[in-house]
Amino acid sequence: MGPGRLTCVLVLALVLALGSRPQEQPPRESHNLNWNKFSGFWYILAVASESRGFLPGRGRRKLGASVVKVLKAGQLKVVLAFSRSQGCQSHTLILRKDRKKAMFRNTLKGVEGFHVLSTDYSYGVVYVRLGRAGRTSKTLLFFSRENTSSFPSMRKFVDVCEILEVANAVTVLPKDASCAHTILP
Ligand SMILES: *[C@@H]1O[C@H](CO)[C@@H](O)[C@H](O)[C@H]1NC(C)=O
């Protein structure tokens, strides 16, 4: 069994194990998140999305990446790179802080919310709500400073996916950094 396959089996085992547990409290946004510490380059090692077509077919999947930068108080610049069916694509978004909630958004660009649900600044569970009011879909991204992850942080990601009911869409991306590295700062 190759390492990719082993990861899939582990994740599946985890999903099944978590599935039998009683529902936990929904994750809360991190109000005391230090965005300066969260800034910089991240690999995206896994994705769970409600929107079909977010990821390309198996053969075209690669690690994603993100570069997060605080522009000024209340503004965040987020670059995201993903291997899509059309190839490696990157997008730059300027997000504005919500006045009350610990999240950022750019409704003109179809980002209703960008929240960090869990982080120790070496990994991050990021919740992105894409679409327009009334027609949005959830996407959870597993950020990691390294191209590999520790089992507890991956478990945390799957845990959050389970609570948000996207655990059956968890996809661990293949360890190919060729697209991710196109946005290295
Ligand atoms: C992962 O990162 C390490 C250390 O930065 C590097 O040596 C290794 O080649 C990387 N692996 C892949 C698949 O990019």
Image (tube, rainbow, N blue to C red):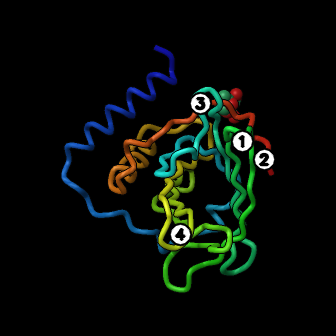
- Left-right relation of 153 to 123: left
Q: Which residue is mark 3?
A: 174
On the image, the x and y values in percent for residue 131 come to: 56, 64
Circle 3 sits in a helix, a strand or a loop, which is it? Answer: loop
Q: Are marks 2 and 1 in contact (CB under 8 Å)?
A: yes
Measure the alpha-carbon separation of dots 4 and 3. Answer: 29 Å
Q: CA distance from mark 2 to mark 1?
A: 7 Å
The amino acid at mark 3 is Pro
Q: CA distance from mark 2 to mark 3?
A: 18 Å
Q: Earlier in the sequence, mark 4 or mark 3?
A: 4
Residue 142 location in percent, x, y?
A: 53, 48
Which residue does the numbered mark 1 point to in the structure image?
Answer: 180
Could you tell me the amino acid type at mark 4?
Leu
Is disc 3 surrounded by few (<14), some (14 to 19) or many (20+) residues within 10 Å? some
Name the residue located 53 percent from the left edge and 51 percent from the top edge.
141
Q: Could you say which quadrant of the image residue 84 lies in?
A: top right
Looking at marks 3 and 1 on the same chain, the residue that comes earlier in the sequence is marked by 3
Tag count:
4
Nearest to the eye among marks 2 and 1: give it.
Answer: 1
Residue occupied by mark 2: 184
- Confirm if mark 4 falls within 8 A of ligand 1: no
The numbered disc on residue 33 is 4
- Residue 7 position in % (x across, y down): 45, 28
Residue type marked 1:
Ala
Amino acid on which disc 2 is placed: Leu
